[in-house]
Amino acid sequence: MSEPPAASDAVDRNLVQRYLDGDRRAATDLVDRYQRPLFNVALRMLGNAQDAEDATQEVFGTVFRSLTTYDPRFRFFSWIYRMTVNQSLNVLKARKVMVTLEDQLAIPSAGVAVDDAVEAEEQVRKALTVLKPDDRAVVVLRYFGSLSYEEIAEVLEVPARAVKSRLFTARERLRAVLLSQGGD
């Protein structure tokens, strides 16, 4: 989302109100506006495109079923991102993520140079799946969702200073996982 937060908030509030007033085109506009960033967050959280697509669909279903409970005094994007993080966490809990021997064999061994961006992305994706869901959420929102500390704090419902601390810890854990996998 490239527009300034205040402009973005005004657009979101307008679309929500239009939807509540019966304009179903506003639903399409909200989906168009948020589908890609929510899918990207879910994909980074879940590490699987089909699960991310399902989670994103579920989030939009929940949004439109509960839009009457949204309080426009708060930022819509925080509300919908929080739903996405929560849905992703629910999927992770349901599937009880485990690293299989097959996954371990697919990880490059130490000393292998990772020049190809696709291969590097795959290493990071695998490393993210090893992190605890809370660590994964803060890394995904910051680096793949491009949210500020304050925005992440809103989404995760924690103080901004806690976000900084969690992000530091999560980055250290991610670095350790990548090093153990032979990444840089």
Image (cartoon, grey):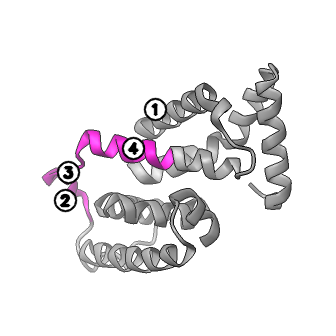
Q: Residues within 10 Å of mark 2 (few under 14, many from 20)?
A: few
Estimate the spatial distance between the alpha carbons at disc 1 and disc 2, rounded to whole Å.
26 Å
First in sequence: mark 4 vs mark 1: 4
Question: Which residue appears at 26% of the width and 63% of the height?
Answer: 107
Q: Name the residue under label 3.
A: 98
Residue 113 in the image: above or below residue 124? below
Residue 131 in the image: above or below residue 17? below
Helix, strand, or loop for circle 4? loop
First in sequence: mark 3 vs mark 1: 1
Q: Name the residue under label 1.
A: 54
How many numbered circles does the render carry?
4
Question: What amino acid type should be assigned to the residue bearing mark 1?
Answer: Asp
Q: Which quadrant would residue 31 be assigned to in this image?
A: top right
Question: What amino acid type should be assigned to the residue bearing mark 2?
Answer: Gln
Estimate the spatial distance between the alpha carbons at disc 3 and disc 1, rounded to whole Å.
20 Å
What secondary structure prevails in the magenta region? helix
First in sequence: mark 2 vs mark 3: 3
**Residue 172's x, y, as percent?**
36, 80
First in sequence: mark 4 vs mark 3: 4
Question: Which residue appears at 47% of the width and 66% of the height?
Answer: 139
- Is 13 inside the magenta-drawn segment? no
- Would residue 100 be found to the left or right of residue 35 on screen? left
Q: How crowded is mark 3: few (under 14 residues within 10 Å), some or many (20 or more)?
A: few
In the picture, the quarter occupied by the C terminus is: bottom left
Q: Residues within 10 Å of mark 4 (few under 14, many from 20)?
A: few
Question: What amino acid type should be assigned to the residue bearing mark 4?
Answer: Asn
Tag nearer the camera, 1 or 2: 1
First in sequence: mark 2 vs mark 4: 4
Estimate the spatial distance between the alpha carbons at disc 2 and disc 4, rounded to whole Å.
17 Å
Question: Which residue appears at 60% of the width and 33% of the height?
Answer: 63
Tell me if label 4 and label 3 are in contact, CB under 8 Å.
no
